[in-house]
Structure formats: C-alpha cells, structure tokens
Image: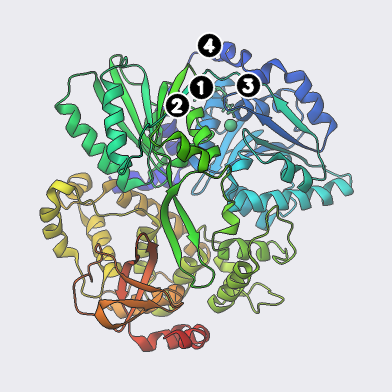
Amino acid sequence: NTKKDKEQTTNGATNNNKLENNFPKENTEDLKEARKSLPVYLVRTRIIEEIKKHDTMILIGETGSGKTTQIPQLIHEYRLEGKSCVAVTQPRRVAAITLALRVAAEMNTDIGSIVGYSVRFEDVTSPRTKVKYLTDGMLLREAVTDPLLKKYSIIVLDEAHERTVNTDVLFGIVKLAQKERNGQKQNPLKVIVMSATMDVDSFRKYYDNCPVIYLEGRTYPVTIYHSKIKHEDYQYAAICTIFQLHTTTPANEDFLVFLTGQEEIETVMSNIKQIAKETVGPQIRVCPLYAGLPAAKQLLVWKKTPPGMRKIVLATNIAEASVTIPEIRYVIDTGVVKERTWCTRTGAERLSVVPCSQAASWQRAGRAGRTAAGASYRLYTATDFKCRRQHNIPEIVRCPLTSTVLMLIATGLDPGTFPLIDTPPKDSIHAALLLLKELGAVDNESNPKLTVLGKKMTAFPIDPKYAKILLCAPEYGCLEEALSLVAVMSSENVFHTPLHKREDALKVKQKFISPLGDHITLLNVYRAFCKAPLKKQWCRENYLNHKNLSYAFDVRQQLLLVCQRLNLAVSSCGNATDQLLKCLLSGLFTNCAWSRAGGRYVTSAGAAASLHPSSVLHGRSANPALVYTELLHTQRSFLINVSVVQPQWLQQVAPEYARRCRSNR
Ligand code: ADP
Ligand code: MG
C-alpha cells in the first residue's frame, strides 16, 4: 500500500478524484434552482455594480446568505476578474476544499479547471483557473515571492471576523499591494472583505472609510436553547443531550457537536458507540472532524447516510464557520474552545480550554439553519452567555509571531511599521526578532535582513524552529531521522490509549520506549510503522493511531521534496541518537528545562513545570536537562514530549541563547 500512498500525495489528479468521491454529487438543475433562491443571488446586479464602482468594500451578510459560494461565481459570470483570477481566502483548509467542490458542482465543471483550491501540501488549480479558494496561509506564502499578488485582479478576504494571524497580515499585504498597483493604474486590484459578524467600524477605518454593504439574510430559523444549570462536565452533558435528541427526533435530522480537540472527540466517539449498542433508536454513524484529520477523511462528513441512519458529526471549531453540512438540524454547543495563548514574559505557550466568544456561538448555531430550520443546544446558561466577550480576541495579540515576522521580512516588509488593524504587543515582535536572530534566520534585530539560512527556512511550510532542525540535520548526519521526527511532531498524538484498555496499551507501548525520552520513542514508533506490512491492523494491535501516522507519512514526503530541492544531504545517523537530539535542540533550544528539587523543572524562560504523565520519562529519576516540544498549561504547567539532553549541548548549539538565559537557571 505504501507505493499507492505515495502516488496519492504527489499526484494531484489521483488525490482529488479520491476527494471528490467523498463529496455528494447533486443534480445540476437542482443546484441551479437552489442558487436562485439565495439572498446574494436576488440582489446580484446591485452587488456587481458596487464591485465595479469601488476598489475596496466590506460585505456583511448573515450566515447562509450565499456570500462565499455566490460572490466569486457572480464575479466570474460577469467576467469582472478580466484575464486573471479571483482569489477567495479561508482560515481553514476543510472550508477551502469543500467550498471549491460545491462551487465547481454548481458551475457544472470539474474541480481544478475553472474552479480550484490550494491548501498546504495540495494545489488543485490549473492555468485556466478563474475562481480559486485558498487558505489565508497559502496566499501569504504566495506573497513572499509576489508581494503585489499580481496573479489576482480581485481578492476576497472571507471570514474576516475570525481574526487569524494570517488573515490579519493579509489585510495589510493587500492594502499595500492595492496602493502600489492602483497608483500605477496598471493591473488594478480590488479587495472585498466579507463576514457575517464583525466589528465593522475598525475595519472601515483601516480601509480608509470604504463602503459597507449589508445583505438581508435568508437562513432558516435556528432556535437557541440554553442549559438551566451549570454543567461541571461538558463532555458528559454533550453525550446526554445527544441521546435525548437521538431517541426523540427523526433519523434523517443530523447532529453537529462542538468539542475541543482530537482526543476529546475520540473519547466521545467511543462513548457514543458504546451507549448506542444499549439504546433503542435509529442506527448511528459518528464522523469526526478536526484539523489533523487527512482531507479525504474529513470529507466523509459530507457523505450521505442511508435512509434511517443518523449522522453525528463531532467537530472542533474548524466546522464553526464557512462550511455547510447539509443535513445538520441540531447543533450541540459545548461553549468551549481550545485556545493557544502565549506569554511574552516567560515564552510559555499555553494550550487551554476556554469559553468561546458570543460571535463563535452564533457561528456555531448558524451551521444548523442552512438547509432547513434547526436548533442549537448550548450546554451553558444564558447568564454565562451574556458574560462572555462579544468577539474573538485577534490571534495576533496572543500568539508567537516568529513565522509571521520571518515571512514579512522575506517579503521585504518592515515588521515594525507594517499596517495592522490591531497591533500586537511590542514585546512579541521583539521576541520574534530575537528568536529569529538566535535561530540564524536574520542577521540582526534592529534592521533585520534575511540570511541564507533564513531564506531556506521560508521554503518549508512549517514553524521556523522545525525548519531549522531540518536545515541543521545534514551537519549531524541525521536528516532521515529528523524528517521522520518533524513529520510526527506535525501530526496529532500517535498513541491511542482507550480508557478501558489502558493497562494493555501501556504494556504494548513498552517495546517502543527509549530511556532518552519521547522523541526517540516517537521515532521508534514511526520506523516500526513504516516497516509494518499491514499498517491498519498493526496499528490496532499496537494501540497506535493509524490516521495520524499516515498523516505524518504524507507530511514527511512533502518535507523531503523541499529538502531535495534545497540539495540537503539525506543521510541517517542509525542508532547514534545523540546526534539527532543535538539536532533537535538546534531548533528547539528555547524549549529547555532544568531539574529542580522534588521532580520539578524550570524552563529556560523561568516558568515552573512538571513532566506530563503521558511522557515516557514520567516517574523515572530526574535528569539535569531536558528539551520539550510543548508547554501545556491547565491547572498546572506540564512539559509535553520531552527528551534528555546534556546541559553543555545548549552552549554548543545556541551559544547566544545560552548566554541570555543563564540568569534564569
Ligand atoms: P455564507 O458564506 O453567506 O455563509 P454560503 O455561500 O457558504 O453562505 O452558502 C449559502 C447556502 O448554499 C447554504 O446556506 C446552503 O443552503 C447552500 N450550500 C452551500 N454549500 C453547500 C453544500 N456543500 N451542500 C448543500 N448546500 C450547500
Ligand atoms: Mg461564508
């Protein structure tokens, strides 16, 4: 099967055929009729006039009014894109893919011709493409080589309210590109900013008081129910609600449940399957939907169930905006989201489960009213809802900006003066510059220029720290291993530990464990996975997650291609794992922790933390120095994916940083 896997990741045609198969085919005439009833379609001539008249506009319309699927189509029908192409950005890849598939179906054309999409690791477009859906990250990468985005005559920035770092930066990039292109009156650029719910005033100010167009909605009514009491355990509350609804509603009315991450989704999934066995009611198909799931698996969510079978989609917030899953009638909204925040002072990244914003709750509810009337069951009280913040906090003010700042410098822009709607804390730009300097990506912090190494880093679609690991690997003769490790680290958890078989799973895990820690353990797992002839079965027997390991396999292929393009020597260090750990440290040197009394550790940045119970080093004797992949903050701070390193290595691989953090030890 390995060879086939390989073909599917490198050959777009095979891949998108497969994707399409998971997407329902509908009658073209029916689709035409459906289009005609959408609010956007009804006022199309007015919208077209406005687009012709203005260089920039903001378009606000309720969820389901047809913004994302219809506006780009209309632009093309009226040939407003001219000889070039219209780009539509989405914060999430699953949205970019399904929207392109839907629009291609509505236009009765094959995906990848007139309508295409481009997401990380996959480009399904051709020179004929006129309507291109792409993730904000992809458009940003295109801007590195073409800051004026000359390929496009119209750029639609969709889901503006999500305020991802990438979309925020794109707002600035298109603003500058537009100024330059429209000033020269050659190849002018039009920009359309779209959203259902957003803070219009600050956007308008940012775009020099551009016009705002409001669309009347035509969504079906969605009834909102709040819990009467506060639930301590939202997973349990979700399962109760699922089965209450399951036993009282017709089977063709599907459910969408919002949870916070893959592991939670898998736990709830196995609980549902277990309970379903003991419950009378329609048959159930449970479909997971989260970012780490391969695209083909994500699309199973759109596959129709046979009559009499209920579909229950368990999703993270990637299903919160943009997407339409046709038969969804009931949304079960746990009201929480896993959010990454960052502390500039300690450098600690925190992944914590927090209440979502009101805007997010409305978006979630909006998934129910798209093809029929529906309801949203909020598993929190109305009072709780009222106390929540109205809009999402822009990612740019709470996330590390290393990748973003590197990308800006690579594009020839000054991160200090770049126009942003919300300025990130000064500290975080400074911290990013400092880290890039220490990684060797830029030559200095005050007037940074990209180094040769920095330029190479931008060739990888991954965090600069991970790119540095790969670029240093030839020096340590371990690129084979580094590629596998970075690929596995880019994927979600590869271990699958079902609650009721915990003991057994831990016993089986023993054979992969390295006393050096989690990274070598992960590498052992990956190596064994590659050798196993019957991968699915092997994973089941070894309590490993087949999906995540296959994803890592795909990612590795893509990263290998970049390494080959850069002429990096792909050699193996065999069992000289010291080499690999040193190499790991050359990218992750900011993630060191030092032993303290009582089995506790302190990070280089001065934060106290303990080993996470999932670490293979947990419960063993303390080591003077560790490198970790992630610092997770729940009630306490935990180090996740940890390996033993020699204290003197830090001085060897990152002398500047070693000097800087010595004071914290
Ligand atoms: P907006 O961007 O304004 O929220 P969209 O353009 O995404 O709205 O979708 C408009 C409507 O088109 C949806 O409410 C739904 O009725 C229909 N639609 C879109 N995508 C699909 C799909 N994959 N399957 C069925 N209906 C769809
Ligand atoms: Mg939309």
Q: Residue at x 33, y 21 (%)?
A: 305
Amino acid on which the number 1 mark rests in the picture: Arg
Disc 4 or 1, which lies upstream in sequence? 4
Compared with residue 382, is residue 339 higher up or lower down, i.e. above or below? below
- Residue 279 placement, left or right of 325: left
Disc 1 or 2, which lies upstream in sequence? 2
Question: CA separation, marks 4 and 1?
Answer: 16 Å
- Tell me whether the residue at label 4 lies in contact with that at label 2, contact meaning CB atoms closer than 8 angstroms: no
Amino acid on which the number 2 mark rests in the picture: Ile
Compared with residue 342, is residue 548 higher up or lower down, i.e. above or below? above
- Tell me whether the residue at label 1 lies in contact with that at label 2, contact meaning CB atoms closer than 8 angstroms: yes
- Per the rendering, the mark at residue 325 is 2
Q: Return the residue at label 3.
A: 217
Nearer to us: label 3 or label 4: 3
Ligand 2 lies in quarter: top right
Q: Return the residue at label 4.
A: 30
Nearer to us: label 1 or label 3: 3
- Residue 300 placement, left or right of 162: left
Question: CA separation, marks 4 and 2?
Answer: 17 Å
**In the picture, residue 83 is in which quadrant?**
top right
Other-residue count near label 2 (Cα within 10 Å), few / some / many at <14 / 14–19 / ≥20: some
Question: CA separation, marks 2 and 3?
Answer: 18 Å
- Tell me whether the residue at label 4 lies in contact with that at label 1, contact meaning CB atoms closer than 8 angstroms: no
Secondary structure of residue under mark 1 = loop
Of residues 375 and 285, the one nearer the viewer is 375
Q: Return the residue at label 1.
A: 370
Nearer to us: label 1 or label 2: 1
